[in-house]
Image (cartoon, grey):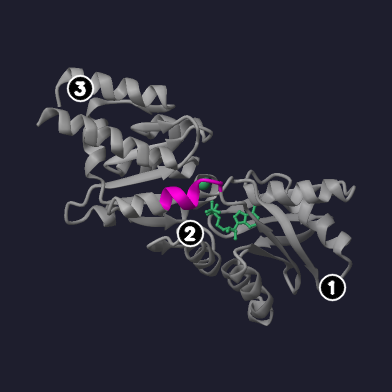
Amino acid sequence: ATPVAIMVGTGKGAENGILIKSGEALEITHNIKSVVLDKTGTITQGKPQVTDILAFKRSEKELLTVAAALEEKSEHPLAEAILEKAGAEGIKPAKAENFLAVSGRGVQAEINGKRFFAGNQKFAKEKGLAAESRDQDMIRLAKEGKTPLLFFDENEILGIIAAADVVKETSAQAIREMKKLGIEVIMLTGDNRRTAEAIKRQLAIDTVIAEVLPQDKEREVARLQEGGRTVAMVGDGINDAPALARADVGIAIGAGTDVAIESADIVLMKSDLLDVVTAVGLSKAVIRNIK
Ligand code: ADP
Ligand code: MG
């Protein structure tokens, strides 16, 4: 495209809150064949709320007390949901020691010298617990699109706390319009497969890649690029940064982390997925202008 066309396109983008960092990004965008969308914070608002508390051993309140202590040092949005719920119930988290976050699994810590864990079924199984006994509850909650977390000690499952995140108002329409443009829409998430499938159905997403470890997101993008497909990645989190850099077009959510914004070619200041569609339109206009 001519420098003038690029300048006009970039200016139009800026007017719409779409920051396009390079002429190259503006040019490639018209050619996107697949869009990879991070789930939490990109498709959803990224602020999950506690929806269900199932206490198997002691009262709900006691379960929440252990949960809050475990999650206090975690920076995960699920941890925030649990602390908010505990706060609303007037629970002050007990002191936890030797806190450890296990990537893609959950967290562990000691409370009064006893070790407790919170996380997914994989985590519980790795710790030697018969997590299958709670499969029915876990499956039911996940099918409702919620993320169920197991709370356990070294001997038994204490309970399940589920949280759910709200899908952003414009996500469904944005995904429909991307598909109308012939773009394949893929959701990438660390969340469990059933929860991801529920959201896939709700939003008519083409493909879901679930239970992806943060460090593997980049590899999934690279795999989609095999054969020369132009792949865009949209994300908000620290763990999206390598995938954003790897993608042909990295698109960061404006409300996201600084690292994601730095790694991206395009920043959506309104944090609205419809602006991906707008960016494709701008790029097409710029390209048409050359010809
Ligand atoms: P995502 O950002 O897509 O949720 P993560 O890799 O951060 O992916 O988390 C994957 C899964 O690990 C979560 O869905 C949850 O089951 C578990 N997990 C992560 N952090 C925590 C936490 N602080 N407490 C409990 N479970 C957690
Ligand atoms: Mg995210």
Name the side, left or right, on which 6 lies relative to 163: left
Count of numbered circles in the view: 3
Cβ atoms under marks 2 and 3 closer than 8 Å: no
Name the side, left or right, on which 215 lies relative to 72: left
Specify start and end residues of the magenta stretch as a single range: 168-175
Q: Which residue is mark 2?
A: 203
**Residue 130 marker:** none
Q: Position of residue 209 (x, y in %)?
A: 41, 62
**Residue 5 marker:** 3
**Would you identify the image quadrant in which residue 277 lies?**
top left
Residue in the image at 82% along x and 62% along y:
63
Residue in the image at 54% along x and 60% along y:
191
Say what secondary structure mark 2 lies in.
Answer: helix
Q: Which residue is mark 1?
A: 57
Locate the N terminus and report the quarter of the image it occupies: top left
Q: Amino acid at mark 2?
A: Leu
Dominant secondary structure (helix, strand or loop) of the stretch shown in magenta: helix
**Would you identify the image quadrant in which residue 45 lies?**
top right
